[in-house]
C-alpha cells in the first residue's frame, strides 16, 4: 500500500508542481481544493480577520497538492464521512476516517501537502472552512501574553473534536446565512474568541493569560455609547470601538462585557433597535428608511430582527405605540438614548 501510494504520489506531485504554487493567498486557497464555487462565503460581507466558506466537495478526489496559506486554517466536516490519506512534503503517510463534527487545524505557513479522499457515506460531503488572519492572531498574542509569537507554535491536527471551535465556526456560518446589522462586529468578536481559544488550548508551549477583573468607567462607557449612536448606519468594528477608549480589542471586549453583561455586538444591536423604536413612534419615515438609518441593509431583515427581539413587527409597533408628537418625513435626527 505504502509503495503504491509513494509511486502514485511522486508522479502526481511532479505533474502538479508545474501548476500548483507552493503558497497562495487565503482567498485563492479554494481554487486548489474544490471544483465548485462555495455555497456560502464571507467574501462580500466586509469581514476582516476571518474568512468563512462552506463547500460541497466531490465524493472522491485523486491526489492533489495543496499550497500553504499565511493564515490559520480550520476545517469542520458538516456533512458526510470520508477516508483521507495525506502527507506533508517528505513526511510519512497519514490515513484516517473522519465524520460529521470532526475538525482539521493547519497553522499558517509551513510546507505544501498532498491528499486524497473518498466519501464513505450516502450523503454529499460538506466542509466549512474558517481562516483566521495571522495578523489578528499575532495582535491577540501580543495583547494577552508576554511571549514572543516567534516562540509559539500551533500544531497541525486532523480529525479531532472540539465543541467550542465547532460552535464558533457554525455561529459564523449562521451569521452569513442570517446577517445581523452588527455582522462585522460579530465576526470580529468571534475571530478574537477563536484566537484566544487556540492560544489557551492548542499551543505546543503553555502560556498564562492574565484574567481581567475590572470594567470600563462611566466616562469610558459614555464615550463608546456616544460613538455607537453617532455611527449606527455604519459597519462598526471591534478595533474602532476599542480605540475610542484606548484599549486593545481583546481588553476592550472583556472590559465591556464585565461592565455591561453583553458583548459589543449585542449592545450595538440593542441600541439600533432602541433607535428604531424612537424613529417609528416619533417620525413618519417609511420603514425602509428607518431600517437604513439604524444600520440594517434591508427592510425585510429589519422586520425579521425587530420581530424576533421585540415580539411584533415594526409596522405593528408603530401602530400600537402612536405618539402624540410626530415629526415630518424629512426629520431624521436621532434621539440620543
Image (cartoon, helix red, strand yellow):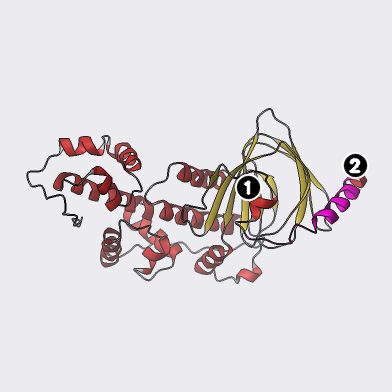
Q: Position of residue 290 (x, y in %)?
A: 25, 48
In the image: residue 45, left or right of residue 158: left
Sequence-wise, the earlier of marks 2 and 1 is: 2
> Residue 226, can we see it?
yes
Residue closest to the eye, 131 or 279: 279
Residue at which label 1 appears: 75
Magenta region: which residues? 5-25
Magenta region includes residue 72? no
> Can you tell which quarter of the image residue 223 is in?
bottom left
Per the image, label 2 sits on a secondary structure element best described as loop
Q: Residue at x 39, y 65 (%)?
A: 240
Q: Quadrant location of the C terminus? A: bottom left
Q: Position of residue 302 (x, y in %)?
A: 32, 43
In the image: residue 169, left or right of residue 61: left
Residue closest to the eye, 273 or 160: 273
Q: Quadrant location of the N terminus? A: top right
Residue closest to the eye, 137 or 214: 137
Q: Residue at x 38, y 69 (%)?
A: 243
Per the image, label 1 sits on a secondary structure element best described as strand
Q: Residue at x 70, y 59 (%)?
A: 68
Residue at which label 2 appears: 1
Q: CA distance from mark 2 to mark 1?
A: 27 Å
Near mark 1 (Cα within 10 A), the count class, few <14, some 14-19 or many ≥20, is: many
> Can you tell which quarter of the image residue 153 is in?
bottom right
> Residue 263, can we see it?
no
In the image: residue 100, left or right of residue 323: right
Amino acid at each position: 500500500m505504502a509503495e503504491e501510494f509513494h509511486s502514485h504520489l511522486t508522479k502526481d506531485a511532479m505533474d502538479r508542481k508545474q501548476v500548483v504554487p507552493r503558497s497562495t493567498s487565503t482567498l485563492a486557497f479554494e481554487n486548489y481544493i474544490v471544483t465548485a464555487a462555495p455555497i456560502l462565503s464571507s467574501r462580500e460581507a466586509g469581514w476582516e480577520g476571518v474568512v468563512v466558506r462552506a463547500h460541497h466537495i466531490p465524493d472522491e478526489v485523486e491526489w492533489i497538492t495543496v499550497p500553504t496559506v499565511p493564515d490559520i486554517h480550520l476545517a469542520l466536516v458538516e456533512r458526510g464521512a470520508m477516508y483521507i490519506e495525506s502527507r506533508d512534503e517528505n513526511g510519512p503517510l497519514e490515513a484516517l476516517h473522519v465524520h460529521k463534527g470532526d475538525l482539521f487545524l493547519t497553522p499558517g505557513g509551513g510546507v505544501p501537502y498532498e491528499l486524497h479522499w473518498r466519501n464513505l457515506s450516502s450523503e454529499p460531503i460538506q466542509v466549512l472552512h474558517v481562516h483566521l488572519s495571522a495578523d489578528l492572531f499575532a495582535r491577540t498574542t501580543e495583547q494577552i501574553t508576554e511571549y514572543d509569537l516567534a516562540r509559539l507554535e500551533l500544531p497541525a491536527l486532523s480529525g479531532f473534536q472540539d465543541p467550542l471551535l465547532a460552535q464558533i465556526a457554525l455561529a459564523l456560518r449562521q451569521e452569513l446565512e442570517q446577517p445581523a446589522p452588527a455582522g462585522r462586529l460579530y465576526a470580529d468578536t468571534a475571530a478574537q474568541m477563536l484566537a484566544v481559544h487556540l492560544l489557551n488550548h492548542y499551543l505546543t508551549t503553555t502560556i498564562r493569560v492574565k484574567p481581567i477583573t475590572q470594567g470600563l468607567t462611566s466616562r469610558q462607557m459614555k464615550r463608546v455609547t456616544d460613538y455607537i449612536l453617532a455611527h449606527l448606519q455604519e459597519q462598526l468594528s471591534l478595533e474602532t470601538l476599542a480605540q475610542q477608549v484606548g484599549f486593545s480589542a481583546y481588553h476592550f471586549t472583556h472590559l465591556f462585557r464585565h461592565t455591561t453583561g453583553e458583548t459589543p455586538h449585542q449592545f450595538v444591536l440593542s441600541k439600533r433597535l432602541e433607535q428604531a423604536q424612537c424613529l417609528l413612534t416619533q417620525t413618519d419615515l417609511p420603514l425602509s428608511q428607518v431600517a437604513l438609518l439604524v444600520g440594517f441593509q434591508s427592510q425585510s431583515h429589519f422586520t425579521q430582527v425587530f420581530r424576533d427581539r421585540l415580539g411584533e413587527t415594526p409596522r405593528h409597533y408603530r401602530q400600537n405605540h402612536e405618539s402624540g408628537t410626530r415629526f415630518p418625513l424629512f426629520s431624521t435626527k436621532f434621539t440620543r438614548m
